[in-house]
């Protein structure tokens, strides 16, 4: 049964906002229609602008989108209108090389990339110059077993979903270990494979708990706030929640690789809408992995097995090849 649970040690405001969802009428009242398909970019291949098994995605608030490709062993940078700008990386374990690049996050200074095979985080400038790295295979502080999602908070701290260690690790911007939380289990603050990770507008930490079919929310020091969950295909239920992101209003978007859809919730776990379905047509997905929202409010969803990124917005737009700038302008 789908549920929302809260930490009674949280603030009374959070508790009253979340208990049972019956006390969240504003969330229920604002259930929304699914966004419209706007355009897509990518397509199978290894040349500029093409993709082969894309996975992670992030935006920098300055008109650029960063995409990791696990089978092309690289990061590609696009404009928010889908124009390829640059790329870096090759297969390997050296500096600037990748094996299993998955998660990606962008701060005001750096680009962070997790690697599930090399068990590390690599750090780059916005233009792909190598800066540093940290991590190796293991279970100790600063070690990883298949790190996946990654995100940064307003202070520049870095959070990593350490998937097979069933925990979240927190670091400084330069990779100094700060703390960790989580262990295997199904209780509050426990995990069964951490995958996606996102930071909300007030530094709320959201984590997809893959095999527990739920989202958990924490403070920046790892204190459990609430979760919402349920195994199923209906509204607000999950089958393999994977990636997630949070918009400026605090609404949470979650991808499901098995359900081939995106589900939208309020910050308190109230279901708002969903969209998708298996296939290769516009608005359909085959393994939607991670997603990100650009500064204009467009939602970029990695459609992994279709080797593309699909973009959605609140209003339909007629797109022609020479109208990308006009598309973007409509969402400012």
Image: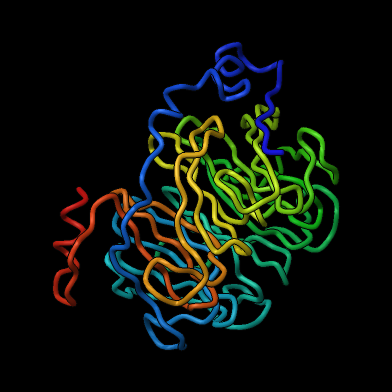
Residue 153: image location, x then y, percent? 52, 39
Q: Residue at x 61, y 14 (%)?
A: 11
Image: 315 above or below 102 = above
Image: 189 above or below 276 = above
Is residue 51 found left or right of 48 in the rendered image? Answer: right
Q: Residue at x 64, y 42 (%)?
A: 215
Image: 219 above or below 264 = above
Is residue 157 found left or right of 273 in the rendered image? Answer: right
Colouring mode (rainbow / by chain / secondary structure / one colour): rainbow
Nearer the observer, 123 or 98? 98
Quarter-wise, where is residue 317 in the image?
A: bottom left
Residue 131: image location, x then y, percent? 54, 62
Q: Residue at x 31, y 48 (%)?
A: 297
Nearer the observer, 124 or 230? 230
The residue at the far top in this view is 12
Quarter-wise, where is residue 326 in the image?
A: bottom left
Q: Residue at x 33, y 75 (%)?
A: 84
Residue 323: image location, x then y, percent? 14, 70
Q: Is residue 271 visible?
A: yes
Number of marks in the image?
0
The N terminus is located in which quarter? top right
Q: Is residue 123 visible?
A: no
Quarter-wise, where is residue 239 in the image?
A: bottom right
Residue 217: image location, x then y, percent? 63, 35
């Amino acid at each position: 049964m789908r549920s929302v649970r809260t930490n009674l040690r949280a603030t009374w405001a959070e508790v009253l906002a979340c208990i049972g969802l019956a006390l969240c009428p504003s969330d229920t009242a604002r259930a929304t229609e699914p966004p419209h398909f706007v355009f897509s970019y990518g397509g199978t291949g290894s040349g500029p602008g093409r993709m082969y098994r894309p996975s992670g995605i992030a935006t920098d608030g300055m008109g650029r989108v960063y995409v990791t490709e696990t089978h092309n062993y690289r990061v590609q940078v696009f404009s928010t209108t889908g124009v390829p700008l640059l790329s870096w990386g090759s297969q390997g374990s050296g500096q600037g090389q990748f094996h299993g690049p998955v998660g990606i996050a962008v701060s005001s200074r750096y680009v962070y990339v997790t690697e599930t095979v090399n068990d590390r985080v690599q750090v780059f400038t916005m233009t792909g110059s190598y800066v540093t790295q940290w991590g190796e295979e293991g279970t100790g502080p600063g070690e990883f077993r298949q790190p996946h999602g990654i995100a940064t908070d307003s202070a520049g701290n870095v959070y990593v979903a350490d998937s097979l260690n069933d925990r979240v690790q927190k670091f400084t911007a330069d990779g100094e270990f700060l703390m960790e939380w989580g262990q295997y289990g199904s209780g509050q603050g426990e995990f069964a494979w951490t995958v996606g990770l996102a930071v909300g507008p007030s530094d709320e930490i959201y984590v997809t708990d893959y095999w527990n079919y739920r989202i958990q929310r924490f403070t920046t020091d790892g204190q459990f706030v609430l979760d919402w969950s349920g195994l199923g295909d209906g509204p607000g239920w999950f089958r393999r929640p994977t990636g997630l992101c949070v918009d400026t209003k605090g609404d949470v978007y979650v991808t499901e690789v098995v359900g081939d859809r995106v589900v939208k919730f309020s910050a308190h776990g109230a279901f708002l809408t969903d969209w998708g379905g298996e296939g290769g047509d516009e608005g359909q997905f085959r393994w939607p992995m991670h997603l990100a929202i650009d500064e204009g409010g467009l939602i970029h969803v990695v459609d992994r097995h279709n080797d593309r990124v699909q973009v959605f917005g609140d209003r339909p737009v007629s797109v022609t090849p020479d109208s990308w700038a006009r598309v973007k302008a409509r969402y400012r």
